[in-house]
């Protein structure tokens, strides 16, 4: 799973660089990467209670 998450991270960064800062998708990507910890919280494996 980790390689897929890393590929997604790289793809989002590359796509963001091609977008206008006014693009709503670019704003969402910016939100994901602006605050430290957001991407990590999104990309870490879920913990399931048993």
Image (tube, rainbow, N blue to C red):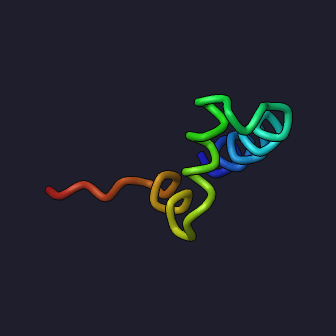
> Residue 1: x and y, percent?
59, 45
**Is residue 5 depicted above or below 19 in this figure?**
below
Q: Quadrant of residue 22?
A: top right
Residue sitting at the far bottom: 36
* Foreground of the two, 11 or 29: 29
* Foreground of the two, 44 or 35: 35
In the figure, is residue 4 to the left or right of 41? right
> Residue 41: x and y, percent?
46, 60
> Residue 32: x and y, percent?
56, 51
**Is residue 37 depicted above or below 20 in this figure?**
below
Residue sitting at the far left: 50
Q: Quadrant of residue 19?
A: top right
At x 76% / y 38%, what residue is drawn? 16
Q: How many marks?
A: 0
Q: For the C terminus, which image quadrant?
A: bottom left
At x 70% / y 47%, what residue is drawn? 9
In the figure, is residue 31 to the left or right of 48? right
* Foreground of the two, 49 or 8: 8
At x 61% / y 31%, what residue is drawn? 25
In the figure, is residue 46 to the left or right of 43? left
């Amino acid at each position: 799973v980790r390689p897929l998450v890393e590929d997604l991270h790289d793809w989002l960064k590359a796509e963001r660089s091609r977008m206008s800062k006014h693009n709503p998708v670019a704003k969402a990507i910016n939100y994901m990467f602006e605050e430290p910890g957001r991407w990590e919280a999104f990309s870490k494996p879920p913990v399931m209670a048993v």
